Image (tube, helix red, strand yellow):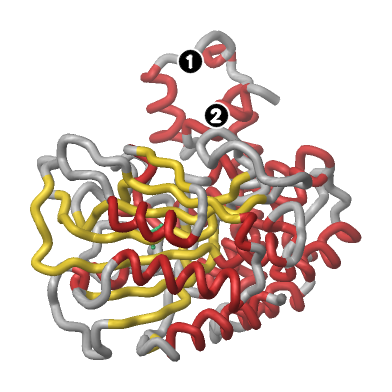
Amino acid sequence: MRTDQLIRTFVEYYEERGHRRITGSTLLPPPGDPVLFTTSGMHPLTPYLEGRPHPLGKRLVNVQRCLRTTDLDEVGDATHLTVFEMLGTWSLGDYGGPLSLDWGYGLLTEGLGIDPGLLHATVYAGDDRTGRDTDSLELWQGLGVPVELTVEDNWWPKSVDDNEGDGPVGPCGPDSEIFLWSGDGPPQSTPTRDDRWVEVWNHVTMTHRRLADGSLAPLPQRNVDTGLGLERLASLLQGKPSVFACDVFDPWRRLVPPLWPLEEPDLRLVSDHLRSAVVVLGDGVRPSSTGRGYVLRRLVRRVLTVLWRQDASRSLGDLPEDLVRHTLDHFRQDVRPGDVLRTLLDEEQRFGRLLERGRRVLARPRFQGPLSEEDFHYLHDTHGLPRDLVTSLRQE
Ligand code: SER
């Protein structure tokens, strides 16, 4: 099943169950939001999860593009991307967690044809703040799906550090996660002990609001917020070993290797970061030295560092326009591919000049030994050389 078909099946299934589709949109949160990028489908819905009535009612469904920089170092493994799409459903003070799980199970098994024997669930075991989530536990037991109980892994957001983007305050609560077996043989063990269990869908019963001091206050209404990683489920349904092999990456796999022969891990990083950079540019961000623009700059620089490690003549200006257009079209972004390529090329040239200057400055006798904090400050403030760049230049 291709991703566009998967999106349609998902949305129609929930529309048949009274959900209204809200427009999934830009990666940029509204002004005033302290977070740089939208990190999950629920993010734009925060005011409604906290009690404001939503104009489309109490049952919503959505496809939301998300960007997570917390996962940057995991990019290249089988399941993480920087920009990904999240299919989401919400009950705003309407039905509860067990019905949400029951519908989720129905969609996965009957709607998408997944063998029920390949599913595993996790459920919140309870701690001194709130009790065990027995409703979800009983639902899964009734469906015959094996359950693992955990504490930290089944509270969303897991912790402030794990979810930098979701901030320290906001709606939270116990969740029940659905895992799909990706191994070759029959399923074994449990999700926390065997990573061939891949998390595909998280159903959060939002019961509380986390306050700035870390304490929990009950929400005026109980909500259910679910999120399903599109590319992750698509790759499993398509029998592919990683998200990079699902249909979303077909054009990247076809067009990048003839241009730049790369080993698989580098191909994954280059494809992920360039695709993310195109989407971020498509949403109107420009490279800069702070905030969103700096995230974009880091993505582009990571790509160039990989490309130039083998061949310094490689240039982003050679990227086929078709590749950029394919990504912009997929995300319905009305931007000219040529403009995106020009910005990438400008950024490349800027980085090239910075590297040259960096090498020259770092060759001075003063910087031959270990660098002090003062040296790092000087290199940054006087020569515009960020710490991570200095560190990587010294490893050359
Ligand atoms: N907010 C939850 C998540 O991001 C479910 O949508 O996983």
In which quadrant of the rendered image does the C terminus lie?
Answer: top right
Tell whether 52 sits left or right of 322: left
Name the residue at 64% across, 70% down.
Answer: 342
Helix, strand or loop status at disc 1:
loop
Helix, strand or loop status at disc 2:
helix
Q: Which mark is residue 358?
A: none
Q: Amino acid at mark 2?
A: Val
Instruction: Report the front residue among 308 and 260.
Output: 260
Query: Visible in this render: residue 297?
Result: no
Instruction: Report the front residue among 136 and 388.
Output: 136
Q: Where residue 204 sits in the image (x, y, percent)?
A: 33, 59
**Of callouts 2 and 1, which one flags the residue occurring earlier in the amino acid sequence?**
1
Q: Residue furthest right?
A: 258
Name the residue at 53% across, 41% down.
Answer: 191
Residue at label 1? Answer: 371
Residue at label 2? Answer: 390
Q: Please report contact status of discs 2 and 1: CB closer than 8 Å, yes or no.
A: yes
Q: Where residue 140 sits in the image (x, y, percent)?
A: 43, 57
